[in-house]
Amino acid sequence: MTKAEIQFVRSLSDKRTRDEHGVFIAEGDKLIGEILSSHLKIHKIYALAGHLEPHAEIVSEKEMERISQLKSASSSLAIVEQPRHTTPHTAPSDALTLALDGVQNPGNLGTIIRLADWFGISDIFCSTDCADCYNPKVIQATMGAILRVRVHYLPLAQFLDRTKQRGVAIYGTMLDGENIYSAELKSEGVIVMGNEGKGVSKECQRSFTHSLLIPSFPPERQGSESLNVAMATGIVCAEFRRRNF
């Protein structure tokens, strides 16, 4: 690899550079193998000898360590074109979708994208201050789900308000909400999950048609203050799908 190539790949750790070139980094034979079978265009693949041949340019272990975005370098790295999604004016009325308000931890966002894929949720609507879905840590945490789930960034409060006006149910997770296990849940609507520390903003709360609580057990026990947002998302999505299976 040339010095310029190494510098360019390393520069893609920065969101502005990724967006400028319209690409993201994917690492690992399994993930890159999935991308090769998908509709996404791969600009370049770098790999150690014996990996992803004949698709890859073979590099040394030292070179791979220099370009890897991970703590432990993988055996392959690809520069992939970002998918282009058309963002709808409102959430669909005939599907279950997710909305994320200020989820900033890349690991949480990646896990939520993976959960959405598992539970058959095709669209996630994110506030503009959420973590970037093309952050290398997010990409790795999705385990390939980023190829099947559309992630949109937009002014979320206004989006939810427009969606509510269309008669679509907006479910928000709140500490004073109704017990999710006894609440009425439809098979379509928007599930809103909030920031790791602050929860859902007041601007977004105004659009809620239903407030839901994941109760602790037993209810009177003094335990953890709250659940991790990715864990809570998994519980909520599982209950919606269980009810409407």
Image: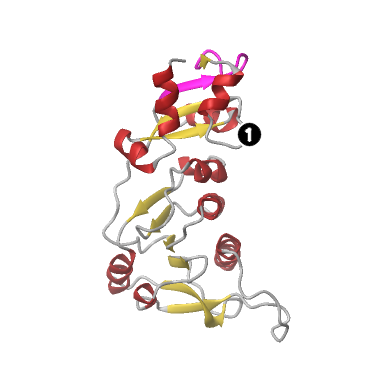
Residue 35 % position (x, y):
48, 31
Residue 113 % position (x, y):
50, 51
Residue 219 falls left or right of residue 175: right
Residue 97 % position (x, y):
43, 60
Q: Mark yes or no: residue 39 visible.
A: no
Residue at 61 percent across and 19 percent down: it is 61
> Is 19 rendered above or below residue 2?
below
Residue at 46 percent across and 34 percent down: it is 25
Q: Which residue is tagged 1? A: 72
> Is 230 rendered above or below residue 80?
below
Can residue 52 be found in the magenta stretch?
A: yes
Residue at 71 percent across and 82 percent down: it is 222
Q: Quadrant of the C terminus?
A: bottom right
Secondary structure mostly seen in magenta is loop
Residue 197 falls left or right of residue 49: left
Q: Image quadrant of residue 142?
A: top right
> Is 230 rendered above or below residue 149?
below
Name the image colouring.
secondary structure
Residue numbers of the magenta segment: 42-56
Q: Mark yes or no: residue 26 visible.
A: yes
Can residue 218 be found in the magenta stretch?
A: no
Instruction: Say what secondary structure mark 1 lies in.
Output: loop
For label 1, count other residues whose C-alpha is less than 10 Å away and answer few (under 14), some (14-19) or many (20+). Answer: few
Q: Furthest-bottom residue in view?
A: 220
Residue at 32 percent across and 41 percent down: it is 84
Q: Image quadrant of residue 209?
A: bottom left
Q: Image quadrant of residue 75?
A: top right
Residue 81 % position (x, y):
37, 32
Q: How many marks?
A: 1
Query: Considering depth in this image, is 73 or 66 the residue closer to the camera?
Result: 66
What's the amino acid at mark 1? Answer: Ser
